Amino acid sequence: MVEIKKIEPTKSNLKKFTQFQIDLYDGNPYYVPPLVSDDVATLSPQVNPAFDFCESVYFMAYRDGKPVGRIAGIINNQVNERHHSRTARFGFIDFIDDEEVSAALMSAVEKWARDKGMKKLIGPLGFTDLDHEGMLVEGFQELSTMATIYNYAYYPRHMEKLGYKKESDWVEFLMDVPDEIPEKYNRIADIVKKKFGLKVLKYKSRKRIKDEYGRALFHLINDAYDGLYEYSHLTEKQIDYYIDIYLGLLNLDLVTLIVDKDDQLVSVGISMPSMSKALQKSKGKMLPLGWWHLLKGLKGKNDRVDLLLVAVKPEYQNKGANALLFQDLIPYYIKYGYKYAESNPEMETNAKVQGQWEYFKNRQHRRRRSFYKNL
């Protein structure tokens, strides 16, 4: 018999909620654990500023006193208001390969959502687009990344058995880092610079980039991603929160800003060395030695770079501004010895974004999906 318990969002409970996933994937060579402290912060109403417009519930499934599954229910009121919808989300979902368990978890969130007056349930999604989203449906034998969900191949089968259908897919690409900048990229970049008066900015000081363009960077993300699937606009409070989290970690050689003749931000490209193997060694914990593995991941030898974020102001999209980003970044990838570049999830229908990879040797190596069910 499966018992479902609602989990109160205390720090201790959220640690157990997060640890369940790490234990479930123990020994899996493709799974990359989150930092427990990061997920606890994301799930905590006292810490995450998304709770200014989101509400959530957490459930864990038990059998004979042993945890066998977990799930979060989320309502993003900001997105619902923008789209005049009554949609709830499920996320942070993990379960053993047992249909009774998955059915009990989904039933608990469905009831919660209906009681809140919601008419549709979608997921897996987080509170906002900066959280992990999309259930893996292809690429189970590919090493996961810090920014994405890994799940066993049985997960989507369970969802379909429960009556959930495809709503949207994301695809991911693995590119070979070229030995030099592709000639076409160079040519496009030079034309765009002259035509629009654009220039590349690089920084050595985190404080300076934060002071001069920290807020503008996240406002650009809001503009560039507006209209994408279930996009949740970042508030000023969220921007303050994320500025400190993200800018403190980055190697600024791998951060490129493009500005116009008035020094207004037009485009940004943010990369970082793959943290997948370092996070696997850390097992999701900073102590006792997790911090050492993470530091080695950031500073040590690495053959893979993660393309965390590429954002282009809407009026410059399809005009070659992204060519300037990679004209600047590719020499740094070569300098640091990266052989492969990993894209973040991109909507399968987003031809604009996928078109930028055609100049590199690449393969589409993962696909992930959001499911829906009308309540």
Image (cartoon, rainbow, N blue to C red):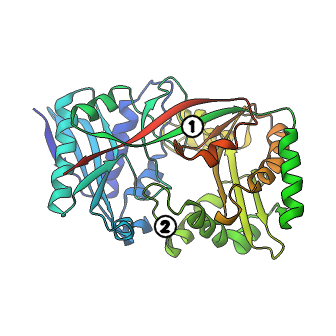
User: Which residue type carries mark 1?
Assistant: Glu
Residue sitting nearer the eye, 84 or 264: 84
Residue sitting nearer the eye, 35 or 250: 250
194 is higher (above) or lower (below) than 374: below
Residue 125, given in percent of the width and then of the height, sits at 39, 50
Q: Residue tagged by mark 2?
A: 233
Q: Residue visible at 19% across and 50% down?
A: 110
Give the number of callouts: 2
The quarter in which the N terminus is drawn is top left
Secondary element under disc 2, as helix, strand or loop, is: loop
Q: Residue tagged by mark 1?
A: 172
Q: Residue visible at 52% across and 44% down?
A: 349
Gap in angstroms between the C-alphas marked 1 and 2: 23 Å
User: Which residue type carries mark 2?
Assistant: His
Q: Residue visible at 23% across and 44% down?
A: 60
Q: Is residue 232 left or right of residue 106?
A: right
Q: Residue visible at 49% across and 36% down?
A: 283
333 is higher (above) or lower (below) than 48: above
Secondary element under disc 1, as helix, strand or loop, is: strand
Find residue 46 and name its label.
none
Q: Determine the image quadrant of residue 167.
A: top left
Residue 113, given in percent of the width and then of the height, sits at 21, 57
Q: Earlier in the sequence, mark 1 or mark 2?
A: 1
Q: Determine the image quadrant of residue 68.
A: top left
Res. 66 visible in picture: no
Res. 28 visible in picture: yes
Q: Is residue 62 left or right of residue 349?
A: left
Q: Is residue 112 left or right of residue 89?
A: left
